[in-house]
Amino acid sequence: MPDIAAPRNTVIIFDLDGTLVDSAPDLSGAMNHVLEAEGHDAIPAQDVRHLVGHGAKALLEAGLARHGITASEEEMAALIERFIAHYKVHLTDSTVPFRHVGKTLEHLAEGGFPLAVCTNKREELALPLLEDLKLTSFFDCIICRDSLPSYKPDPLPLLTCAERTGASRGVMVGDTMTDLTAAIAADMPCLIASFGYGTFTETEIKKARQFDDFDEIPGIISEIFSD
């Protein structure tokens, strides 16, 4: 992995689901648990993979829609509670970090960069997941959906990561339009994982730098700051 020619007062901020970890199997598993409890057939994980980064409600709405059902607001709230209860005890049954995540985080940390997580996952889910996968120690700051008054695509969580790590600038590493929108609003460059859960138009993706493997990140960061 190359040395990084970039300012060390730069925080590297990572999204969680679809960026650091492949959580689609366990999240779709929680969706199917709810569907089956309601008497419906399970849905293949690949059919809802693109919705994983949008939360439990989006997954459940898509799952129900496949069966021609639209839940009321009250019904959906109850289904989400059941989803969360199941998911909390199956956070890392099949969830794993993407290839080269640990090696890349270690390399960046050794290079003097503060590292942060900015996720729209709730603290009660994100924090134990990171702990289970032995990733917590890499990060100087972890911001979740309910850590602040607002969450991505609002820029506040990204700006808070910079503030809490003492950085004067940041780079967002994510996989969805939510991450890219937040980065643009925070005036930060954005790297997008091609293997993540997001979909982009040709115009949208031109606003970011794509990568296919985590070990490409140090080189891309160097290029960004040498331009």
Image: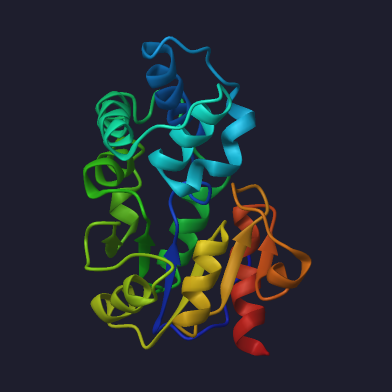
Q: Is residue 175 above or below residue 151?
A: above
Seen in the image, is 99 located left or right of residue 106? right
Q: Residue at x 50, y 65 (%)?
A: 179
**Pick the front one: 198 or 221:** 198
Q: Residue furthest top?
A: 39
- Where is residue 3 shown, x and y percent of the image? 58, 72
Q: Is residue 94 above or below residue 139?
A: above
- Say whether residue 173 is visible: no
Q: How many marks?
A: 0
Q: Residue at x 39, y 72 (%)?
A: 154
User: How does the figure colour the protein chain or chains?
Assistant: rainbow
Image quarter (top left, top right, bottom left or bottom right) of the N terminus: bottom right
- Where is residue 25 shown, x and y percent of the image? 50, 28
Q: Residue at x 49, y 61 (%)?
A: 107
**Pick the front one: 189 or 155:** 155
Q: Residue furthest right?
A: 202
